Amino acid sequence: MERAEKREFVTELTEVFKTSGSVVVAHYAGVTVAQMNDFRSRMRAAGGTVKVAKNRLAKIALQGTESEGIVDLFQGQTLIAYSEDPITAPKVVMDFAKTNEKIVVLGGAMGSTMLDADAVKSLATLPSLDELRAKLLGMIQTPATRIAGVVQAPASQLARVFSAYAKKDEAA
């Protein structure tokens, strides 16, 4: 890498650390190119990104960001996975790590909160933002349909009573 490329990469990585909902750092020693491509495509499909960064450049990019506390994680062959949704990156990394034991999660960051490997695992078990919205919407709609049924019931009963009286008057 030339010096200009390094500067551009550090600037890009700094922006990633500042704007991402969550960042996961993991070792990837022994992962084949095909496995890495599969991992990247899974992450991309979920709305995240996986990058292999030189540790020295990543440490420079972390300076002055909220995530500066994860500098110590950058030792050995490390990759970073990040996404805007705080749950997406940890979930995809942990799912991939289940099938590939060569991916070892070291930790990560969620804004200014530093996460160890167990915290990343816990974060991965939470439902995503879209899933939470769907559940919340379902909870809100259920009482509304019940209320509509209760409100309509007396009106329909009243209509049946009027209909019965009308038929009775016609018969008489």
Image: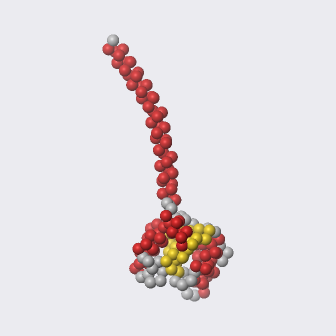
Quadrant where the image shows the N terminus: bottom right
**Residue drawn at point x = 49 percent, y = 41 percent:** 144
Q: Position of residue 105 (x, y in %)?
A: 51, 75
In this view, the residue farthest toward the front is 118
**Residue drawn at point x = 41 percent, y = 78 percent:** 35
In this view, the residue farthest toward the bottom is 2
Count of numbered circles in the view:
0
Q: Position of residue 60 (x, y in %)?
A: 63, 81
Front in this rendered view, residue 30 or 4: 30
Q: Position of residue 118 (x, y in %)?
A: 53, 70
Q: Position of residue 28 (x, y in %)?
A: 48, 80
Front in this rendered view, residue 9 or 154: 154
Residue 152, placed above or below residue 69? above
Tell me if residue 52 can be seen.
no
**Residue drawn at point x = 57 percent, y = 72 percent:** 116
Q: 24 left or right of 30?
A: right
